[in-house]
Image: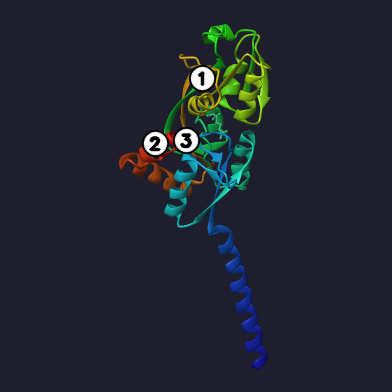
Amino acid sequence: MKKTRILATIALMLVLAVAFAAAGCAGSKDVVMGTSSGFEPFEFVDADQKVIGIDVDIANLIAKEAGKDLKVEDMNFDSLIAAVQSGKIDFVAAGMTANDERRQNVDFSDTYFDASQVIIVKEGSAIKTAADLVGKKIAVQQGTTGADLAGEIEGATLDNLTKVADCVTELLQDKVDAVVIDSYPAQKSVEKNAGLVILSEPLSVEQYAIAVKKGNTDLLAKINKVIAAIKADGTLDAIIAKYSSES
Ligand code: ARG
């Protein structure tokens, strides 16, 4: 009798241990955002080395909707898709353009920002339009749509770099003739560095969305709910405005 009770207790403890472990996996208290800082105003590092920006603010609202704490994983942009596929991160919020190529590997939320790829050159450059980029040296951020577009330019040589700031530095040092990057980070770079201009004609028009692992419909529904709500009540505009004035 006593022995049976002990055995029953052990069995119960084992069942509970397994149940807690399972809950720990499925119901972790963190939701992990993957991003790639150095892309102001969407994600950049503040004086305390904390990643802040438009995407982080949106991600915080997603975490709240999911009833979890937000954890931010900062990595190279071209590692993000693999990280969400492997489950290292739960979603990508990185000013990522939703496109069909990426849709083969991840699911995208509704879009939250209209962007474009622009050309930055030095003031007084002979490059006035995209057509003038033929045969030129162009710095791009590795793995981005800007890199893809620049790669299609006839005879152009690409310098694939990990950060936007590195692209801008190469241009300032005349190591390249132009930089092809997203419009808003381009604007921030030009504000911070004298002698640079953005050509008026964009190379492409794109939309940013948040990416999740294929089939993660539960999280995707929560993300879309947040995006719809913040678009409708003006919160998204307020978040964007907050980082336009800040620098
Ligand atoms: N929108 C571009 C793309 O999706 C560039 C995004 C770069 N983002 C970043 N956080 N560095 O390819």
Q: Residue at x 62, y 48 (%)?
A: 88
* Residue under pointer 1: 118
Disc 3 to disc 2, C-alpha distance: 19 Å
Furthest-left residue in this view = 233
Disc 3 or 2, which lies upstream in sequence?
A: 3
203 in relation to 238, above or below: above
Q: Nearer the viewer, mark 3 or mark 1?
A: 1
Amino acid identity at mark 3 = Ala
Disc 3 or 1, which lies upstream in sequence?
A: 1
Query: Between residues 229 and 17, which one lies in front from this camera angle?
Result: 229
Amino acid identity at mark 2 = Ala
* Residue under pointer 3: 209
Examine the rendering and report whether any part of residue 111 can be seen.
no
14 in relation to 81, above or below: below
Furthest-bottom residue in this view = 1
Q: Quadrant of residue 66?
A: bottom left
Q: Quadrant of ligand 1?
A: top right
Q: Secondary structure at mark 1?
A: strand
Residue 172 horizontal/vertical position (percent): 63, 20
Q: Residues within 10 Å of mark 2 (few under 14, many from 20)?
A: few
Amino acid identity at mark 1 = Val
Q: Residues within 10 Å of mark 1 (few under 14, many from 20)?
A: many
Disc 1 or 2, which lies upstream in sequence?
A: 1
Disc 1 to disc 2, C-alpha distance: 21 Å
Disc 3 to disc 1, C-alpha distance: 19 Å
* Residue under pointer 2: 241
Pointers 3 and 1 in contact (CB under 8 A)? Answer: no
